[in-house]
Image (spheres, helix red, strand yellow):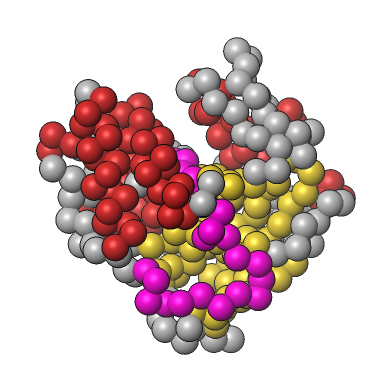
Amino acid sequence: MNPGAIVEAAALLADHRLRRVPLDTLPEALRPGDEAEAYAVQDALHERLVPSLGRVAGHKIGCTTAVMQAFLGISHPCAGGVFARTVHASPAEIPHAGFVRVGVECEIVARLATPLVPRPVDYTRYDVEKAVGALMAGMEIVDARYVDYSKLDMPTLLADDFFDAGCVLGPAVHDFRAIDLESVVGVTTINGVEVGRGRGADVMGHPFEALAWLANRRSQRGLGIDAGEFVFLGSVVETKWVAAGDHVVMELEGLGRIEARFT
């Protein structure tokens, strides 16, 4: 893609997202052909969205678990941004009409105390753990803002932040090193009925493997992850779509409980 096509694709994606008009597909000339082009469009999209949605305050990683890879038919992780004005504290009330088709995902979230800067040597999960200042229970809010997302190619979904539409965060847990993150069980309930559960080990064997993946993926592009930013490490429960009025509760052992009502 030439620079003009990248900017034009980002403008089209931003327009559809902000107006909540379902996207059919990008015109062929504006469609990223691979991951490198997809991330280039995503970068340009972020520049377009910041004036409306605030700065990029955090990151999300999709498809880090077998359940989500099977759900979306994508075999590898994908990264996106989370904007400051889409971040909510638990308990939250969120207008259901603010989305095309809203869903929720149950995740462990890491907030960095020190930055993960670009470097020539890959980060390991033990390296990135040293940079984490706190963990939180997190509810990622996703939006299927497409006519039929199952018919879209992976680079187009990646360019559009891989469904991200915001999040709900629980209180920070600073003494997380006492928690066996592989054994942490996450449970999602909607209107008091359990709809799914999973374990921390479902996230690439250990949640910090996902954080290391993101640090290395961004490092390859000359980018870091800043201190104070948070990272959603991947859903341990398959995406659940919610209706107006639904009350969603998520609990992650040792990390707390979060809730949101979609009004």
Which quarter of the rendering shows the N terminus? top left
Residue depicted at x 58% and y 47%: 57
What are the residue bounds of the magenta stretch?
78-99
Residue depicted at x 32% and y 57%: 17
Residue depicted at x 22% and y 57%: 23
Vertically, is 263 above or below 59?
Answer: below
Report how many numbered discs are placed on residues in the image: 0
Vertically, is 2 above or below 141?
Answer: above
Can residue 70 be seen here? The reply is no
Inspect the magenta stretch and tell me whether residue 79 lies in it: yes
- Out of 208 and 118, give the one closest to the viewer: 118
**Residue at the far top in the pictured view:** 120
Residue 231, percent from left and from top: 61, 46
Rendering quarter of residue 2: top left
Vertically, is 164 above or below 27?
Answer: below
**Left or right of 67 on screen, residue 258:** right
